[in-house]
């Protein structure tokens, strides 16, 4: 996602109070993590070094946001039993937490009665919703990002996130099934 990374980074860098991320796919196939995922699948070992070339830019970005007082929360809705990709994500989540993110997991069965946005998204300061668009194979669509600022849309997305967050299990208590 290099052509859009600056746009996302700018939005997170401008956040003053909160940044929340809702993930709802069981599989992602984004190219920038393909090598790491393949290594994990082949060896069972995941890069979990916050200072590695893979993680350092993210850890730095989140750490700067946290240093400004921004609360960063990530909620993942997952099917159970989980896919290999979700196992891979779970194995690396300790780095998200190390960077300062709060992470929770919600089994999809517990989300059945929720009205949710149609795709993954970030919400910044309750004022901007950044939708993440993916192909059916889980790679970035073109264009991959859509920024919406209409108060009704942002409010709907924020409300959905908060319900998911309340139901979800904190990372340190979520057991992979």
Image: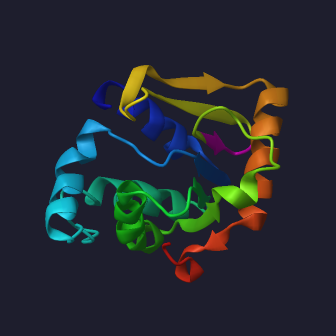
| Left or right relative to 169: residue 111 | right
| Left or right relative to 117: residue 48 | left
Residue 69, percent from left and from top = 61, 63
Magenta segment main secondary structure:
strand
User: In terms of depth relative to the viewer, which is nearer, 99 or 96?
Assistant: 96
Q: Is residue 165 inside the magenta stretch?
A: no
Q: Residue furthest bottom?
A: 173
40 shown above or below 170:
above
92 shown above or below 112:
below
Residue at 24 percent of width and 71 percent of height = 49
Residue at 42 percent of width and 46 percent of height = 27
Residue at 26 percent of width and 47 percent of height = 33
| Left or right relative to 70: residue 138 | left
**Colour treatment of the image:** rainbow
Residue 149, percent from left and from top = 71, 26
Count of numbered circles in the view? 0
User: In terms of depth relative to the viewer, which is nearer, 7 or 35?
Assistant: 35
Residue at 30 percent of width and 53 percent of height = 57
Residue 108, percent from left and from top = 65, 55
| Left or right relative to 15: residue 58 | left
Snapshot quadrant of residue 103: bottom right
User: In terms of depth relative to the viewer, which is nearer, 83 or 10?
Assistant: 83
Snapshot quadrant of residue 85: bottom left
141 shown above or below 92:
above
Which quarter of the rendering shows the N terminus? top left
User: In terms of depth relative to the viewer, which is nearer, 34 or 71?
Assistant: 34
Residue 65, percent from left and from top = 51, 57
Q: Which residues are magenta?
A: 122-126
Q: Residue furthest top?
A: 142
């Amino acid at each position: 996602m290099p052509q859009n990374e600056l746009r996302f980074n700018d939005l997170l860098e401008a956040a003053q109070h909160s940044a929340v991320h809702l993930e709802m796919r069981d599989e992602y196939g984004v190219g920038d993590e393909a090598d790491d995922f393949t290594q994990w699948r082949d060896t069972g070992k995941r890069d979990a070094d916050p200072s590695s070339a893979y993680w350092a830019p993210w850890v730095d970005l989140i750490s700067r946001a946290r240093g400004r007082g921004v609360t960063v929360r990530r909620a993942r809705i997952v099917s159970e039993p989980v896919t290999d990709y979700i196992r891979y994500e779970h194995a690396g989540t300790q780095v998200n937490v190390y960077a300062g993110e709060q992470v929770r997991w919600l089994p999809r069965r517990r989300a059945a009665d929720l009205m949710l946005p149609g795709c993954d998204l970030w919400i910044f300061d309750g004022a901007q919703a950044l939708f993440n668009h993916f192909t059916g194979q889980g790679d970035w669509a073109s264009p991959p990002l859509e920024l919406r600022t209409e108060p009704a849309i942002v409010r709907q997305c924020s409300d959905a996130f908060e319900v998911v967050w309340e139901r979800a299990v904190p990372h340190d208590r979520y057991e992979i099934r």
